[in-house]
Image (cartoon, grey):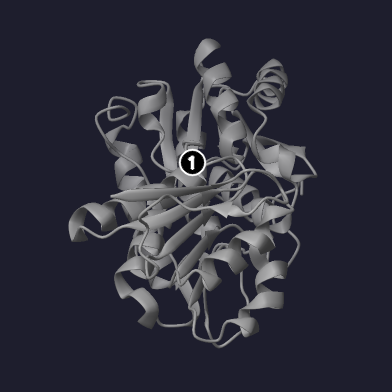
Amino acid sequence: MTLTARFLSATAALALSAGAALADPAVVYDLGGKFDKSFNEAAFGGAERWAQETGGSYRDIEMQSEAQREQALRRLAEGGSNPIVMTGFAFMSVLEQIAADYPDTAFVIIDGVVDEPNVRSVVFTEHEGSYLVGMLAAMASESGVVGFVGGMDIPLIRRFGCGYAQGVVAANPDAQVIINFTGTTPAAWNDPVRGGEITQAQISQGADVVYAAAGGTGVGVLQTAADADILSIGVDSNQNHLHPGQVLTSMLKRVDNAVYDALSAGAEVETGIQVMDLASGGVGWALDEHNESLITDEMRAAMESASNAIAAGDIVVHDYMADSSCPVSGF
């Protein structure tokens, strides 16, 4: 049974559902909410899977403002939640400040690295998964022009875009990649209207496949693409079902597995850095009944070949976060 906690205001006390056991683990979602159909919802799915399989319960909190991050973590730690899982790099600075105050509490941060003995830092090789969907975009495009709509303009999202562009030109060296970001503040993750406007602008420049790596903003990207009868690519969660036959694929980032594994390990979760890459199934691409008619045998073969080559190290996808440059122009 899921026990949900919400904040009444930025300065109000954390309200925990009645009956929550003090030892319940907890999940704190980033801005955009747990039903963003993307990153946060993947985390929610992992927590729900753990609860259903084990019969356990957990607390979860949907952030309403930046000011609540520290309050959330301290209140949960003081209430006995262990481990405490948080989604998003934006928790890094707060966790760096408070982790040492609760040495008996295990913290798990997804998409960030915090060097404290009681913290597990989970990171993904998003550039590898994005490379694969970039290849698919190039192979599906009829115009030779594809788009990328990123959320907040930060190195992490440029890692998605750079990996995508590398995959595009690997499949079609003559292809053009249009790159835009939604904004420079956290609001960029939850602005589907702006996402739709950017998508429309890319369509006017000839794009007929658009990849969204923008959290809740991506819902607007996928909707606008469907309305214009072009293809889109989802991210994090499998978003193929949102517009069957219009979403070419989704770049899977197995945040659900990261949360499930952390809750399964409980207070004894192993700390340190955990890298979830393509070889370990941490990233990939989605094929199901909603997009199988769009994926040709040639595309499937290309995906299998490229996946095997990346896993074996024969193809090395440039990581923008390791070197803030990109072999494809536009970054």
Classify 108 as above or below 216.
Answer: below
Residue 297, located in which quarter of the rendered image?
top left
Residue 174 is left or right of residue 232, and the answer is right
Nearest the viewer among 87 and 82 is: 82
The amino acid on which the numbered mark 1 sits, given as a three-letter code, is Ser
Residue 149, located in which quarter of the rendered image?
top right
Classify 30 as above or below 93.
Answer: above
Q: Which residue is mark 1?
A: 38
Residue 91 is left or right of residue 285, and the answer is right
Residue at 51%, 37% (x, y): give it. 36
Q: Residue 156 location in percent, x, y? A: 66, 57
Q: Residue 86 location in percent, x, y? A: 53, 61
**Could you tell me if residue 267 is visible in this image?**
yes
**Could you tell me if residue 115 is visible in this image?**
no
Q: How many marks?
A: 1
Classify 78 as above or below 43.
Answer: below
Q: Residue 58 location in percent, x, y? A: 37, 58
Residue at 49%, 41% (x, y): give it. 38
Classify 309 as above or below 188.
Answer: below
Residue at 67%, 18% (x, y): give it. 200
Q: Can you name the residue that lies furthest to the front here?
A: 18
Local SS, label 1: loop
Q: Can you name the residue that lies furthest to the right here?
A: 184
Residue 83 is left or right of residue 145, and the answer is left
Q: Residue 126 location in percent, x, y? A: 53, 57
- 10 Å neighbourhood of mark 1: few (<14), some, or many (≥20)? many
Residue at 41%, 82% (x, y): give it. 270
